[in-house]
Image (spheres, rainbow, N blue to C red):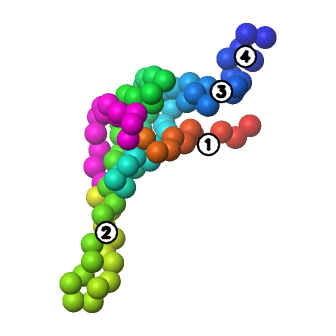
Amino acid sequence: MGSEEESTVKEPLDLIRLSLDERIYVKLRSDRELRGKLHAYDQHLNMILGDVEEIVTTVEIDDETYEEIVRATRRTIPFLFVRGDGVILVSPPLRTT
């Protein structure tokens, strides 16, 4: 019975608790996205992620054609502290049962 209670989701933060030591997706303000292994978090959604891939999307307007130019810049970061007030969305790993 104890292990069943540990794997159930009753509150939103339970879903994050179940994602500890797994790769998650985090969408941040200012068009930033992160994918990394969740090592720790708190009730404010401050998180410590490891083996992080960061994607920053920028949109520029061409001066001559006025077309939007979308650029995605990627980088990898070994460890990252994410401040919770910048978090828009947290997606746990896909679970198939």
* Residue type beneath disc 4: Glu
Q: Is residue 41 above or below residue 65?
A: above
Q: Among all residues in the image, which is located at the extreme top? A: 2
Q: CA distance from mark 1 to mark 4?
A: 20 Å
Q: Which numbered tag is attached to residue 94?
A: 1
Residue assigned mark 4:
5
> In the figure, residue 16 lies in which quadrant?
top right
Q: Is residue 45 above or below residue 30?
A: above
- Residue 67 on image: x %, y %: 32, 83
* Residue type beneath disc 3: Glu
Q: CA distance from mark 3 to mark 2?
A: 37 Å
Residue assigned mark 2:
59
- Residue 35 on image: x %, y %: 42, 43
The span shown in magenta is 74-86
Decide which of tag 1 and tag 2 comes sooner along the chain: 2
* Residue type beneath disc 2: Val
Residue assigned mark 3:
11
Q: CA distance from mark 1 to mark 2?
A: 30 Å
Proximity of marks 1 and 4: CB atoms separated by less than 8 Å: no
Decide which of tag 1 and tag 4 comes sooner along the chain: 4
Q: CA distance from mark 4 to mark 2?
A: 45 Å
Left or right, residue 21 beside residue 65: right
Decide which of tag 3 and tag 2 comes sooner along the chain: 3
Proximity of marks 4 and 2: CB atoms separated by less than 8 Å: no
Residue located 51% across and 41% down the image: 90
Q: Nearer the viewer, residue 38 or 83?
A: 83
